[in-house]
Image (cartoon, grey):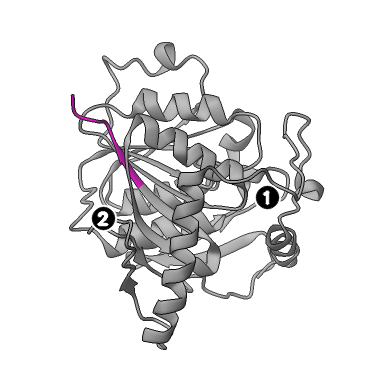
Amino acid sequence: MPVYKNLWSVHLSTGNLSTLCHSSSSAMISAQQPPFPNRIQGIMDCQTEEEETCEEQCNSDDCTWTMNCSSSTADSPVILKILQNWVPRVSHYFDKEHYTYVGHQIVIQESIEHFGAVVWPGALALSQYLESNQEQFNLKDKKVLEIGAGTGLVSIVACILGAYVTATDLPEVLENLSYNISRNTQDMNIHKPEVRKLVWGEDLDEDFPVSTYHYDFLLATDVVYHHTALDPLLATMVHFCKPGTVLLWANKFRFSTDYEFLEKLSNILNTTILAEFPESNVKLIKATVREN
């Protein structure tokens, strides 16, 4: 695995991303976070207690189980582990990663110049979940929009699963995103994906009018972290989440602001935590429009 990814993981584990932030718009937050909202804190406390119980009940590396929290519903999240779908290869390019999903080898070119040009754990978690839960979330011939597509890994997996995919991100990320998607889908008998610019919260009604653009699935991975565009991101999710749309959002939860975003989303949409990946601190959330 590239050396720089190991270095980045050290910063992530300590919660200090200051050396990675090159944009003046990125908002730095201190190591001492404000208290979690009571509701969020209760969820976290319950999760910790149940994880300790589960550790006693399961010793297998690949075992999965359902958490039983006294304050949760019957639809408690399944506890999973991100599988090692990364395939080590001898390569002259240290910025390329090889993965295998849905029986296909996927080669991803990364870049250390942008957050969006690196494969983050949320993308691995969602790719794995889509591959393993095709009956529950059948993407074949469905219209799928990914926001903050980054390297394009999730969009590529969705394409392989038969979806009509539109992958979006900031202008500076589109070149690498387009390269990865084209490289990994050009020789496949699938719906050809589209790559488009999407700046969260900007020109949504003009570029993606609701009367014309309706998506069956909205995908997002690791879009919530310490940046200043959380409110525009929320507005973007709400804009695309219409009746019949399913939002699948996988995110590594690091700071209280991540939980606060989840709280805001839950106040607007019906949200369910489908799965958790404790080793990576990743949660997979499903959200749909509330019925009147």
Measured as percent of width and height from the top left, residue 176 is found at 59, 43
Circle 2 — which element? loop
- Stretch of the chain drawn in magenta: 286-292
Residue 94 can be seen in this image: no
Residue at the extreme right: 19
Q: Amino acid at mark 2?
A: Thr
Q: Residue at x 29, y 65 (%)?
A: 132
Left or right: 86 in relation to 139: right
Q: Residues within 10 Å of mark 1 (few under 14, many from 20)?
A: some
Q: CA distance from mark 2 to mark 1?
A: 41 Å
Q: In the rendered view, tell whether residue 124 sits above or below residue 168.
A: below
Q: Residue at x 32, y 64 (%)?
A: 102
Left or right: 26 in relation to 264: right
Pick whichever, 187 or 149, lies toward us: 149
Measured as percent of width and height from the top left, residue 186 is found at 39, 48
Mark 2 vs mark 1: which is more N-terminal?
Answer: 2
Left or right: 83 in relation to 159: right
- Mark number for residue 73? 2
Callout in the foreground (2, 1): 2
Pick whichever, 32 or 148, lies toward us: 32
Residue 206 can be seen in this image: yes
Q: Which residue is mark 1?
A: 111
Measured as percent of width and height from the top left, residue 275 is found at 36, 60
Quarter occupied by the C terminus: top left
Where is residue 115, by image quadrant? top right
Q: Residues within 10 Å of mark 2 (few under 14, many from 20)?
A: few
Pick whichever, 249 or 197, lies toward us: 249
Q: Residue at x 65, y 35 (%)?
A: 227
Where is residue 67, by image quadrant? bottom left
Q: Amino acid at mark 1?
A: Ser
Assess whether residue 208 is covered by the magenta stretch: no
